[in-house]
Amino acid sequence: MKHIPNFITCLNLAAGFTAVIFASRGMFTTASWLIVAAMVFDFFDGFAARLLHAYSETGKELDSLADVVSFGVAPALIIHKMIEAGVSQAQGASPFMTEILPFVPLLMPVLAGLRLAIFNVDTTQSTVFKGLPTPANAIAAISVVLAAAYSHSPLISSFTGSPVALAVYTIILSILMVTRIPLLSNKFNGFRFSGNEWRFIMAGVTVAMLLIFGIASAPLIIPVYILISVAALYLPFQSR
């Protein structure tokens, strides 16, 4: 039983690596859904560890290694291939676009690894994250892919087809991972509303956006997460 959490973590890693394979073939939507699967496994390995009291240093390190692949390397490769595709379609592309922009996504796995290394030794991030978590980074990356694939929004399609926009987006996400901005942890303190107020608000707003505006609103999930985290920091609920 004690090996179940690590097995689930290995499924996370397997899903992430499979996403890399599909991304390398230009199958960005499939790769994005595989990253979603990796997120599900990432959630359940921690859940299983808590349920079975099967914590271990090996599991902690394995989880970070899997997250680097699934939420650092895989989304970075998707963006890299999308930038390459955009550059190939641009007429008269400059050397900067052809030789520099496709390698901007290198920042993402490097800073994801740094973010996870810091997280592993920082004991102050149990209830509040400092910097954008790597799964949130992956959500931000794949949300534009899935929104472009299923919403057919011209605005989103133009964004995903712009090498410069994708490069800037990558830089912003990568830097956010290593900032010290306090952000809400996704770990609920039980199922009571008290103590989880802002987490329930975040979940409710996210679900409402997706139900009302559909998949086209997916790219707003992480900006909303950041805004609600800032609100939680400066507008805490008063305990009764």
Image (cartoon, rainbow, N blue to C red):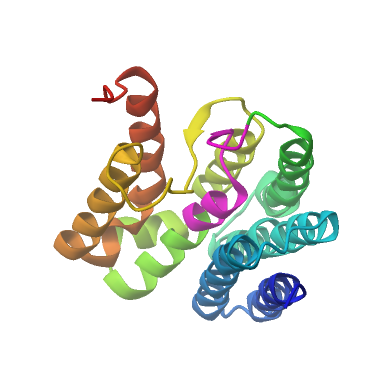
Place of residue 59 in the rendered image (x, y in percent of width and height, measured from the top left): 78, 61
Q: Is residue 128 left or right of residue 10?
A: left
Q: Which picture quadrant has residue 235?
A: top left
- The residue that appears at 64% across and 81% down in the rendered structure is 22
Q: Please determine whether, in this image, residue 32 is positioned above or below residue 107.
A: below
- The residue that appears at 77% across and 47% down in the rendered structure is 113
> Which sits in the foreground, 121 or 216?
121
The magenta stretch spans which residues? 125-140
Q: Which picture quadrant has residue 237?
A: top left
Place of residue 18 in the rendered image (x, y in percent of width and height, measured from the top left): 69, 80
- The residue that appears at 25% across and 59% down in the rendered structure is 207
Q: Please determine whether, in this image, residue 3 is positioned above or below residue 57.
A: below
Q: Is residue 122 left or right of residue 209?
A: right
Q: Quadrant of the N terminus?
A: bottom right
Q: Quadrant of the C terminus?
A: top left
> Which sits in the foreground, 32 or 203?
203
Is residue 137 a member of the stretch shown in magenta? yes
Place of residue 220 in the rendered image (x, y in percent of width and height, measured from the top left): 33, 48
- The residue that appears at 79% across and 59% down in the rendered structure is 65
